[in-house]
Image (spheres, rainbow, N blue to C red):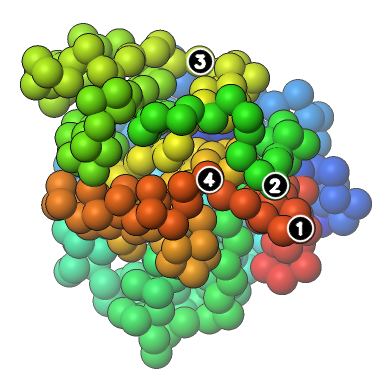
Amino acid sequence: MKILHICSYYVGSLVYKKLFESLDSEGRVNKQYVLVPVRTHYHEGKNQSAKTQVKFIYDKCLNKFTRISFLYKLLRLVSSFQRNPKRAEMLQGCNIIHAHTLYSDGYLAYWLNRKYKIPYVLSVRTTDVSVFERFLPHWRCMTRRVIANAQCLIFISPAHKEAIEERYANYLPRTLLVTNGLDEYWISNAIRSPAPERSKVRSGIYIGEINANKNIKRAILAFFQAADDSDATFTVLGGEYSTFSAIYGELPEMLRSRVDFISRTDDKQRIKELLRQHQVLIMPSFMETFGLTYLEAISQCVPVVFSHGQGIDGLYPEGMVGFSCDPRREKSIAAAILNVFKHFPEGLIFESKNPAEDYSWQSRAQILMKNAY
């Protein structure tokens, strides 16, 4: 099988690379082409894989104007593909096109399907649901066509699946829930009961990039409201306080000494140690396609607080691994944290295996091969 991936957000996330490499190890896949539209030459070659059967084609066809006009973006994508010298190589013998977003990638896949009769599947991500669906309602007529002509519609988040199915109920092809996978490190180091180094005092942690979408300040304030303990502490693993204050402003003076800011790290051992020391992971993002950090925390028996309608919401019954909240309301986040303290005083405890162990990248690739392609 030969697969053409269209992946506009490839340079910003390693999850795609993990998926492509896992597909490469499947016996039926003998060639993958990954078309990566980029805005600058700086992004060309980023996140390249060493797998010889995965070939990346970076195409500088995007610019600042494509961020303003969706129509202009589509025209640039289509015209760039037509001029691409690798076009024939990508399409020759291609069995399936996988568009990794519903909108920009999916619209290009639809055009290729109309022109070259190659079937395509679509993945739906948070930008599709929370940005494009919200701000481009006048494109929904065309979106119906893109969805209806797909071979399969793939969802990463149960919450996004529910939203799209409700809006496009009469146009849906076969649908499939295939979440992102978890790095093998976390599966190998998953535990069934809290680690002995777990803090005895109230302690919360956030792990990830410091940006406005992650809603970090509200998470911190809600944590201390819920903890109601003078010894309580909060850790932000992902950057310096100067970065945080530039985005969110200063923390109240009485809290500043109780919040520890740690520079971003890719050291999984270090991240694991920090997770095991804390009582709750709090990440009430405004938008979250899936959020592998939640699963990493669950693998270490750390309960999680997450947002309604985003990320892992709907993946587990409410209260199984943590609690959801309204990310725009500090009181809702605090209530979710209080529920964690009440229902998981010792942390997550699993009788058999840790549920995070079910999310290997290889299992994601196998589901796609069996049910989507």
Front in this rendered view, residue 103 or 302: 302
Front in this rendered view, residue 13 or 120: 13
Per the rendering, the mark at residue 265 is: 3
- Report the amino acid beneath label 4: Gly
- In this rendering, the answer to whether 338 lies above or below 66 is below
Q: Quadrant of residue 295?
A: top right
Front in this rendered view, residue 53 or 309: 309
Residue 43 % position (x, y): 46, 21
Q: How many residues crowd mark 2 within 10 Å: few (<14), some (14–19), many (20+)?
A: some
Answer with left or right where residue 316 lies relative to residue 79. Answer: right
Front in this rendered view, residue 350 or 14: 350
Answer with left or right where residue 138 lies relative to residue 53. Answer: left
What residue is shown with label 2?
192
Q: Do the residues labelled 1 and 2 touch (CB within 8 Å)?
A: yes
Secondary element at tag 4: loop
- Report the amino acid beneath label 1: Ser
Using the numbered discs, state the Cα–Cα distance from disc 2 to disc 3 in whole angstroms: 25 Å
Using the numbered discs, state the Cα–Cα distance from disc 1 to disc 2 in whole angstroms: 7 Å
Using the numbered discs, state the Cα–Cα distance from disc 3 to disc 1 in whole angstroms: 31 Å
What residue is shown with label 4?
347
Which comes before the other along the chain, label 1 or label 2? 2
What residue is shown with label 1?
352
Which comes before the other along the chain, label 2 or label 3? 2
In the picture, which quadrant includes the N terminus? bottom right
- Report the amino acid beneath label 2: Arg
Residue 307 seen in render: no
